[in-house]
Each structure stands twice: as C-alpha cells, then as structure tokens.
Amino acid sequence: MNFALILFIALVVTGSIWLLDVLVLKRGRDRDVPEPLLVEYAKSFFPVILVVFGLRSFLVEPFKIPSGSMMPTLLIGDFILVNKYTYGIRLPVINKKVVPLSNPERGDVIVFRYPADPGLDYIKRVVGVPGDVVEYRGKQLSINGQPIRTVNTGTYSYVSNGLNYITATVYDEYLSDVGHTMMIESDKPPVNVRQVVDFPNRDSCSYNVDGEGFVCRVPDGHYFSMGDNRDASGDSRYWGFVPDENIVGKAFFIWMNFDHLGRIGSIIR
C-alpha cells in the first residue's frame, strides 16, 4: 500500500473542497445556513492531513520491522523512525531527489523500496557504496581487498519462522569507526547460489558455484546491502544492488516495541 499516495490524494480532495467552498459555495450561502457536512469535514481534516503529509514526506517516517533479517540490531515488532532528509530532499510520492545533501555510508541502516517490487519497503545495512568491491567468503566480509574487523561477543538464540530454535554467533562488526552487531550461523554457506536471481548489473558479481562466497563491484548510483542476521536475510547477495532513487531514508530510532519495552528509545547503529 502506497500510504504517501493515499495521503496526497486525501490532501488534494479535502483542500479542493475547502477552496471550492471559500471561492464559490460560501458566497451563495446565507449566513444563517450551516456549512454542508462535507465542507465541515474537509476543513477539519485538511490541516491535520497537511501536517502528517509534510512530516512523513520531508522529516521522519515510521516503520514496523516485519522480519528477523536485521537481528540482533532490530527485532520483529520494533517500531522505528526513519530520517527522510539525511540523504537529501525528495519529492513525495515519486521519490525524486531535488536537493542532494549527503550519500549513504558503509554501516548505515537504510529503508528502501525493494528493486524487484517498489511497492515493498525493505530495511538493510549498507555494506558497499558506489565503486566498492564487496567480497564475502568463508563468512569473512572484505571491502576493496581489506577484511572487515569483527569481534566475537557471544551468542544469540531465537525461534525462527519455522519454529526452529536457532543459536548464532554474535559479532561487533566495524564497517566504519562505529561498530554494529551482526550474527552468523557457522553451518550455513555464505550464499545459497540457487536463490540468486538474474538482477540488473548481474555481470558485476561473480559467485562460487559451491556457495563459498562471491565478489561484487558496486555500480555508480547503487549500493550493496546485507542484513545483520547474515544467514537469514534476503539481500543484495540474492536480488542485487539498491538504486539511489529507491532509498527512503536512514533508520535511527526505536520508539516502540510492545513485546520488549526496554527497547523503547534505543538508537539504531
């Protein structure tokens, strides 16, 4: 569901009714005659819709985490806020950038429109920026030939969608000066080659047929993303690069989780 489009239509409809009443209908209506109910509703809802539309389009937008692909950083049921202006100001609905401000950096957690179906919003971590050579072999991530530093911090257990009890090893990973958590399951391959689809710029990637790894060069205007739950994430390994025009914003704050109240107010890193 394109909620931004629905808000925009509601904004246009209520605003048009209000304007029509001011310019035409009100002049032919006696002062002691009450406003039509439709006009009254339009005048009441238009300012509210305008504020909500403006906030969601240019400042922050709320999202709910639906899957475990970003565990342990983000849990199912986390309600998060996404900064809409960090990377530039975009026109609402069509998402066209009109004022560039900055670009996503390695380690940023971004929300974007899934390239294969722009009606779906995905959330992943930026691993590679334009021009980077991203390599993932034997569960070791390297960028431009340099292995990314990781520090083992213990284990994390959870119940998967198939009701399997999973225990993964947790690491602090340093794609930048600030580390973030990610986890892997040692018995899973770095990539399941059978699940890789034919995506745009597919010739920029090379996969080992045995599933032991891959290497990709990130094209201009695109980003390589991976989930922090490395072995339970459908990401750029499988469906390709994230175009800049698909980026919605940068996730930065957890404002609610009804099952884990202690997560309220957490900063996403």
Image (cartoon, grey):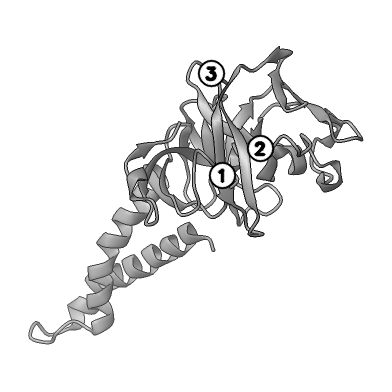
Q: What SS does tag 3 mark?
A: loop
- Residue drawn at (55%, 30%) of the image: 154
Q: Nearer the viewer, residue 150 or 94?
A: 150
Q: Is residue 148 left or right of residue 46?
A: right
At which x and y percent is residue 8? 43, 60
Q: Quadrant of the C terminus?
A: top left
Three-letter residue code for mark 2? Arg
Return the disc, 1 or 2, that comes first in the chain's sequence.
1
How far apart are labels 2 and 3 at the CA level? 18 Å
Three-letter residue code for mark 3? Ser
At which x and y percent is residue 63? 45, 51
Three-letter residue code for mark 1? Ser
Say whether residue 227 is visible: no
Q: What SS does tag 2 mark?
A: helix
Q: Which residue is mark 3?
A: 176
- The mark closer to the camera, 2 or 3, is 2
How far apart are labels 1 and 3 at the CA level? 26 Å
Q: Which residue is mark 2?
A: 230
Q: Which residue is mark 1?
A: 157
Q: Is residue 137 left or right of residue 100?
A: right
At which x and y percent is residue 251? 46, 39
Return the disc, 2 or 3, that comes first in the chain's sequence.
3
- Residue drawn at (32%, 61%) of the image: 49
